[in-house]
Image (cartoon, rainbow, N blue to C red):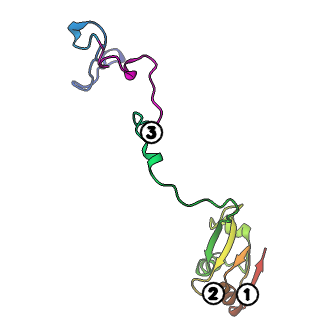
Amino acid sequence: MNLNNIRPAAGSTHSTKRIGRGQGSGKGGTAGKGHNGQQARAGYSQKIGFEGGQMPLQRRLPKFGFNNINRKEYRGINIDTLQILADTKNITEITQDILVENGLAKKREIIKIMGRGELKAGISISAHKFTKSAEEAIANAGGKAITL
């Protein structure tokens, strides 16, 4: 076998239909485009969602809600997650940099500590916000909740 005698598998390729090459081809005359409509013209393209003049679906459906441009998105991190982090990495102080290093948050995210789970170690935690239950749990464990 050489490069000059390689052929595709039998039946895997088809010859293309030659459109507009006379009546004998079966695709002559209108070349598969029907009779004299917008779609028969050269350069025809249709807007996305156009329904032939009927009111398009995206305009028939009702609009609702709004997006508040001043909304702040917080990355919620629970206390039980921080306890696991403190146990595995042997950490006594948790900052935003440590959370970013361990993949719990991204660099520019605003972090909020949530109160799920329990904290056993007295850890100093720095974050942008804390829930009341999280602050209580950190204080009960002998740690500090530092608001950035």
Above or below, comparing residue 136 to residue 63 in the picture: below
Find out whether the residues at labels 1 and 2 contact each other: C-beta distance under 8 Å. yes
Magenta residues? 30-48
The one nearer the camera, 84 or 127, is: 127
Mark found first going from the N terminus, 1 or 2: 2
Q: Identify residue for label 3.
A: 49
Report the amino acid beneath label 1.
Gly
Real-space Cα distance between discs 3 and 2? 54 Å
Q: Identify residue for label 1.
A: 143
Q: Quadrant of the C terminus?
A: bottom right
The one nearer the camera, 23 or 85, is: 23
- The image shows residue 81 at horizontal and vertical percentages of 59, 77
Q: Identify residue for label 2.
A: 119
Above or below, comparing residue 57 to residue 42 in the picture: below
Q: How many marks?
A: 3
Asked whether residue 44 is drawn in magenta, I would say: yes
Residue at point 63%, 87% (across, down): 119
Residue count near mark 2 (Cα–Cα under 10 Å), binned few <14, some 14–19, many ≥20? many
Report the amino acid beneath label 3.
Gly
